[in-house]
Amino acid sequence: MNQYCVGIDVGGTTVKCGIFTYNGVLLDKWEVITRKAESGKYILPDVAEELKKHLEEKTIAYEDITGIGIGVPGPVEPDGHVRVAVNLGWKDVYPAREMRELMGGRIPCAVGNDANVAALGEMWQGGGKGYQNMLMVTLGTGVGGGLILNGKIVTGAHGAGAEIGHIHVRDVEGEKCACGGMGCLEQVASATGIVKEAERFLRMFRDPSSLRIYGKALTAKIVCEAAKAGDQIAYLSLDMSMRSLGIVLAQVSMVADPEVFVIGGGVSRAGDFLLDMIRKHYEEYTPILDKKAVLMLATLGNNAGIYGCARLMLEKE
């Protein structure tokens, strides 16, 4: 009888791994250093070696494992092909196929995009629990998105589904986004974008602000805390960033009509204060909707990926 599932969340610095019971209880978790030398060819063998050790320690037989789900930072094609994962050095890799071979061909494996599987994890055991239609928004160095409709991940025809960080929100923008575009949501509402927006407001207005003492040391956390404390420039700049996010969420509602938006990532640590700010703008731009999506904070933190990877295997049954 299959009693367990395994989640493998492959990141650019470390690979997070977890063993779960069938109903979502995390039994064991560990990390493996991501060895990116020689086009990342050591990453999955290192993970497989450690996984074998942990299964042996817990006396878990391969036959009792439903499967291994793998999350990777890049688009994943329907056949499991990862054309490129820049942060890993991968080109033309089939992670699920390789992991299955490394485990002796005895455990089924599946692969998905890391943002999408994190959304699946939050739906299964986190902030989106109890909902079947949700968008998870990750506000970190960038802005990530994972869309789930009727309980299934929506990847789109080319793996770009829910890439909300690269929706155009601003015509007047002097710098290019990492994607090559200009005026992307990521340039405004990510942790980096929040800092840049605050710096822009500091240049525009001469009003006193606690932010002025930080110079290049200014962070999104400092901006959020200052805004909470009543600093007017911090509040106005943060509000401008969250206005852009609120508009994008309104657009998503008009296309996909999710029940819930789950907000995660480092910026989300600002809590209900940030959520209220986003909600204000989301509601402003969805006047047509009598029933609007609710906004919730993500609850799984850095574990969302491994939860989602494990759930990915249960979805395959």
Image: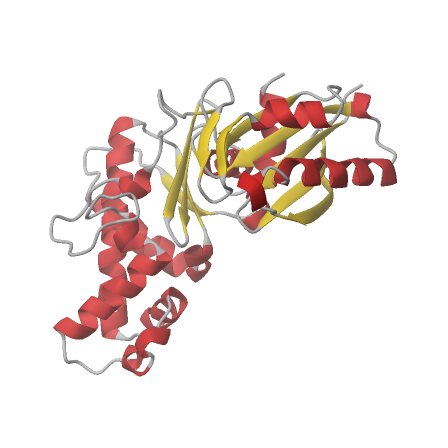
Quadrant in the picture for residue 99 = top right
Question: From what the image shows, is residue 38 above or below residue 272?
Answer: above
Q: Residue at x 69, y 33 (%)?
A: 6
Q: Residue at x 59, y 18 (%)?
A: 316
Q: Provide residue 118's location: percent of width, then percent of height.
A: 51, 39
Q: Provide residue 293's location: percent of width, then percent of height.
A: 35, 37
The C terminus sits in image quarter: top right
Choose between 235 and 308: the one closer to the eye.
308
Do we see residue 194 in this rendering? yes
Quadrant in the picture for residue 42 = top right
Left or right: 215 in relation to 76: left
Left or right: 123 in relation to 28: left
Do we see residue 25 in this rendering? no
Q: Provide residue 143's location: percent of width, then percent of height.
A: 36, 47
Left or right: 7 in relation to 140: right
Residue placed furthest toward the front: 38
Q: How is the image coloured?
A: secondary structure
Question: From what the image shows, is residue 197 above or below residue 149?
Answer: below
